[in-house]
Image (cartoon, grey):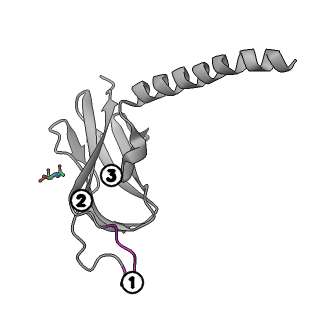
């Protein structure tokens, strides 16, 4: 039994390594070193080609950051809500929302930019010492025609 386990283990390790490699390729880049992670969710509203966009910004370090959150300019969309750019102190996870109408198949790009702190995070909050960092996320929207 003991010898069987010893024989088995290297193979199991290989399997885990290969799986990790595949997952990493699938995600496109190694997200573990990123200060921020973004997730863009597109949910359909009741009317055709109208969507609510939710951009989730996750802070991966245990210090707060001032972050500017936006959707990149896109000629194929019209904002039903304001075309807002948000600036917020993000310490853990925050969600941002936009309602849009889409005229043609398009790739939506959400962006989070760490900007220098300017009285946005509460006094005494531990601020991460980075003043220039960008993270983007893309999502394709297909319209019904
Ligand atoms: C982040 O994006 C802004 C605006 O597009 C740009 O000015 C800045 O150089 C970028 N910063 C980095 C670190 O890429």
What's the distance in space between the residues labelled 1 and 2, CA to CA? 26 Å
Q: Is residue 144 visible in the rendered structure shown here?
A: yes
Disc assigned to residue 78: none
Mark whose residue sits in front, 1 or 2: 1
Q: Nearer the viewer, residue 5 or 17?
A: 5
Disc assigned to residue 85: 2
Span highlighted in magenta in the image: 122-128
- Quadrant (top left, top right, bottom left, bottom right) of the N terminus: top right
**Helix, strand or loop status at disc 1:** loop
**Helix, strand or loop status at disc 3:** strand
Relative to 1, residue 113 above or below: below
**Helix, strand or loop status at disc 2:** loop
Disc assigned to residue 124: 1
Residue 28, position as x, y percentages in the image: 36, 30
Relative to 86, residue 120 above or below: below
Give the residue number, with chain letter if any, for mark 3: 98
Mark sitting earlier along the chain (2/3): 2
Q: Nearer the viewer, residue 97 or 136?
A: 136
- Badge count: 3
- Quadrant (top left, top right, bottom left, bottom right) of the C terminus: top left
- Residue found at the very far front of the displayed protein: 3
Q: Check residue 56 for magenta coloring.
A: no
Q: Is residue 72 left or right of residue 51?
A: left
Q: Residue at x 41, y 31 (%)?
A: 27
- Residue found at the very far right of the displayed protein: 1
């Amino acid at each position: 039994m003991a010898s069987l386990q010893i024989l088995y283990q290297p193979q199991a390790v290989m399997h885990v390594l290969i799986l990790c490699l595949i997952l990493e390729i699938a995600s496109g880049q190694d997200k573990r070193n990123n200060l921020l992670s973004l997730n863009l969710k597109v949910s359909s509203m009741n009317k055709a080609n109208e969507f609510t966009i939710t951009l989730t910004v996750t802070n991966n370090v245990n210090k707060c950051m001032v972050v500017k959150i936006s959707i990149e300019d896109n000629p194929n969309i019209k904002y039903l809500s304001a075309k807002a750019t948000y600036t917020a102190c993000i310490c853990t996870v925050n969600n941002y929302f936009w309602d849009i109408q889409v005229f043609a198949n398009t790739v939506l790009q959400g962006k989070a930019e760490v900007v220098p702190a300017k009285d946005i995070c509460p006094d005494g909050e531990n601020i991460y010492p980075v003043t220039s960092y960008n993270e983007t996320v893309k999502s394709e929207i297909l319209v019904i025609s």
